Amino acid sequence: MLPRKRAVGGDDDDGQNIETAIKKARIDNLNSCSATADATGNSNGSCGKDNSDSGEEIQIEAAKAPGMALGDRNPPEIDEDLHSRQLAVYGRETMRRLFASNILISGMQGLGVEIAKNVILAGVKSVTLHDEGTVELWDLSGNFIFSESDVGKNRALASVQKLQELNNAVIISTLTERLTEEKLSNFQAVVFTDISTEDAIEFDDYCHNHQPPIAFIKTEVRGLFGSVFCDFGPQFTVTDVDGEEPHTGIIASISNDTSALVSCVDDERLEFQDGDLVMFSEVQGMTELNDGKPRKIKHTRPFSFILDEDTTKYGTYERGGIVTQVKQPKILNFKPLREALKDPGEFLLSDFSKFDRPPLLHLAFQALNKFKSELRRFPVSGSEEDAQKLISIATDLNESLGDGKLETIDSKLLKNFAFGARAVLNPMAAMFGGVVGQEVVKACSGKFHPLFQFFYFDSVESLPTEQLDTADLRPRNSRSNGKLTITDDDVIEKSNLSRQFLFRDWNIGQAKSTVAASAAVAINPSLHIEALQNRASPETEYVFDDAYWEGLDVVVNALDNVNARIYIDQKCVYFQKPLLESGTLGAKCNTQMVIPHLTENYGASRDPPEKQAPMCTVHSFPHNIDHCLTWARSEFEGLLEKTPTEVNAYLSNPSEYAAAMKNAGDAQARDNLERVIECLDRERCEAFQDCLTWARLKFEDYFANRVRQLTFTFPEDAPTSTGVPFWSAPKRFPRPLLFNPNDPGQLNFIMAAAILRAETFGIPIPDWAKNPMKVADAVAQVIVPDFQPKTGVKIETDEKATTVNTASVDDAAIINDLILRIEECRKKLQPGFKMNPIQFEKDDDTNYHMDVIAGLANMRARNYSIPEVDKLKAKFIAGRIIPAIATSTAMATGLVCLELYKVLDGKHKVEDYRNTFANLALPLFSMAEPVPPKVMKHRDMTWTVWDRWVLRDNPMLRDLLQWLKDKGLNAYSISCGTSLLYNSMFPRHKERMDRKIIDLAKEVAKVEVPTYRSHIDVVVAFDHLWPGLLVVGGLLIRPTSSACKSEMPPAEKWML
């Protein structure tokens, strides 16, 4: 069952005192002070003092404030600016459940801090940090919270201030004494990162049997090995197993059978599965299905399924209908740790090449617990004696399993496990911090499928390839011996704060790279880091020049678009640099390793492009809210950005603009001129009342007149040329809207549109403009002309059409007339008149941008009987917001850094590297070896995208052609940029045989080598390698002349 509200102490009825306590605790946290409170509520401030010896609970006032009930009629307000990307993953209900949850995290070493960071960023009600130990110097290598000044302090106390900075809305308290079972009753979920198995069994028994159950998570990171165990109680309800939107289909037909066949339009493949429950709506004819009852389906196909129901006595299907998947809750029966250790069930696999690894690690972690219990310490790194001791314990434990014992014990693996058992590596902590942080969210909300119940992982491939001696395992008293360069051309926004730990709210508006660099140096003062504010692109190659790329050892991508990724990938292939690629999408993450000569490059395989709705569907025949929002954003940009920009382009240079339109002479030029004239003439605004009039008439045009014209052109009973009803699925027959000033949605659209229209014209906005009643009164004064549909209006219905503008043979004449009219409009304007284009900004809820877009979309949805959405959902779709959460980001970061170990070692084979796809919602972890590069062959030669030949000197064209011919390659042509240096079909090009390639490039292609570039590129095309196939290769030539100021060795690189 889902966790219910549990008071953490105090009196539920004393709401005023509780609120005061919470506010006081937050103020204390902001002041970086700890408050100790006695049972009477008296508190003493102890700012900057170490109270680890007192054994008292810190900030008890805050921690004992009762949590919000899940059914509270006044749930806390969600800061949508902060949590917008997280809301896109979780939704409001899950966020409210998180806001009501109190979490305990025990063990504040690297793993515990990572979990705490993710949980705090997620926005739970409170987090209590527990640790009885003190900070040691080695803690700094796996923990981003501690600094050298914290050494000797209690770990929990030393963590509070920096963790509190991540989210001031979360109440953070500490416990520094030994935990008891009774203390656990204050929490919805408890996480232990450093606990003996015996204590874990005791605590888990208590949590498992508690009413309601307390979610128990035990997790460890030991060197390159990690484990997670989850127990959410005897009956835990998962309300949404995958977090995906319910699948839908548009019905085309339903048969009257004992098991009805339901066919859907072939617009998109159905994603239903056998056994799914679905609901029907909007079905005409067979209306019995519209009762809202879930129905079971079977025999699912891409565009059809069988309804497990007798429809022979139902009405005959006529048309229409939507079928929607009904997501069912799932009950999980967790076993307590006591039982699960003996009978673990199926382990969650991450790497199918290690399918036999989890049972061995299950044994290894138990052996380590026994080793620590007997010797009161971890195995010493590099100690053969300790490693053999642990192997012996594991062997004895295995023998005691009887029929369930493992056939063989991998002593080498256990030896590596023993050597690194005391280490907490940050990449491992980051990865497991993401996994466990997500499990905490699941425990508190029921959102996503929990980890059931054991998960083991290792990355022994990250170890150096060469055997290390004992000296290599000793500390070197150095935290940095290299240079890190980071670059980002963006600035920090509030929404960035909920999914990372380097930025704070006072950094909003500052450069991301600069702030990140400063934060990184604060974590490790020895780090040599350079922060740039440049986008890596062709336009910035004067910054990221050849010398820069050649000086790199590895490139790590954290980009948010495919084009940028492809550009970086091309550069890494060009300069032979390893690229560690990664990305996240909500609870999903992926990593890809691009290693010179070992793997394919990122651009070698690409995802298919996203399917785009046809232009005619978006403009005239929408059938889902996405179509409405796409249209709404297009209209927003056309009305408020493109048209004002076009007006300014004309006013800045009327004669030049007119000449350009005449030269174009097409439908687009005509449309531009018409929009400018409309803006400066019929729809010109001089006062705010004009803006309201404009908004009211736009409403009438969009949602009444256009619909009347559409249904006049295509009546409800209109057939197509083949006799099929025109308004067949997926088309939806629209109805015009009647303006109602008492409709909040309609009035809010009018108000927001008028405000933005005034902004484009520079018109002051009066105070009453934001008063709905006064706006309604003003709108009532607007005279709306009658509308009569016209005959002969062309409405695009071709799904292949790319524009709704239709060309005309009279375009040129019309354009000439429009230019005369636009001149007349200009004469009526005030001197210096200029418009203010508005660029869409989705993350500012006070700017009315989303109010206009959501209003446009929802009014259009009403026209077509499409379910409307709230402004937040509209923002996700229209703003093309990429869902993001801290947990998947942390996991991707950890996985990439584990691969970084291998890259820096430089001697690993392709089978040692791992590409990963993970979905924390399911949870699913899929790791595999990278794909090797494609090998091409010709005669006795083989090569991949990474291979290149090196020549000496700047060859003559004749020598280059002969050199290639000696390799069996017939050069058909050689080009530089868009210029042809040589083509075998052009006789005059034979005169160039004795010219040097670089000289030809400078003369023919007008190439000049910039100071930041040490080469020029030419492309060579070959024939006769394969019948009928032309192969193109690239040639890098490094000039030796004075044209290149950089000192470069005289070498030319040939790359296929």
Image (cartoon, rainbow, N blue to C red):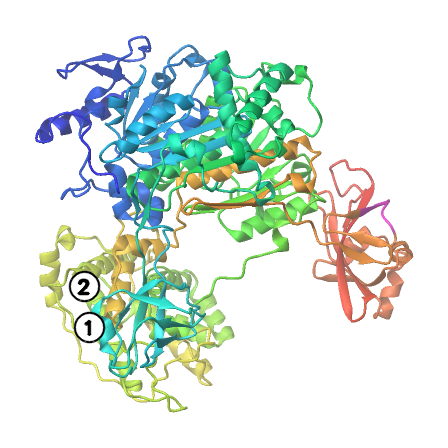
Who's the residue at 44% across and 31% down the image?
A: 515
Q: Secondary structure at mark 1?
A: loop
| Residue 76 on image: x %, y % | 20, 40
Q: Residue furthest front?
A: 402
Q: Quadrant of the N terminus?
A: top left
Q: Kindly indicate the quadrant of the structure image that contains residue 916.
A: top right
Question: Tag 2: Cα neighbours inside 10 Å, few (<14), some, or many (≥20)?
Answer: some
One can see residue 466 in this view: yes
| Residue 482 on image: x %, y % | 62, 25
Against 731, is 568 above or below? above
Q: Residue furthest top?
A: 53
Q: Amino acid at mark 2?
A: Gln
Q: Which mark is residue 737?
A: 1
Q: Kindly indicate the quadrant of the structure image that contains residue 389.
A: top right
Q: Which mark is residue 746?
A: 2
Is 161 part of what is drawn in magenta? no
Question: Tag 1: Cα neighbours inside 10 Å, few (<14), some, or many (≥20)?
Answer: some
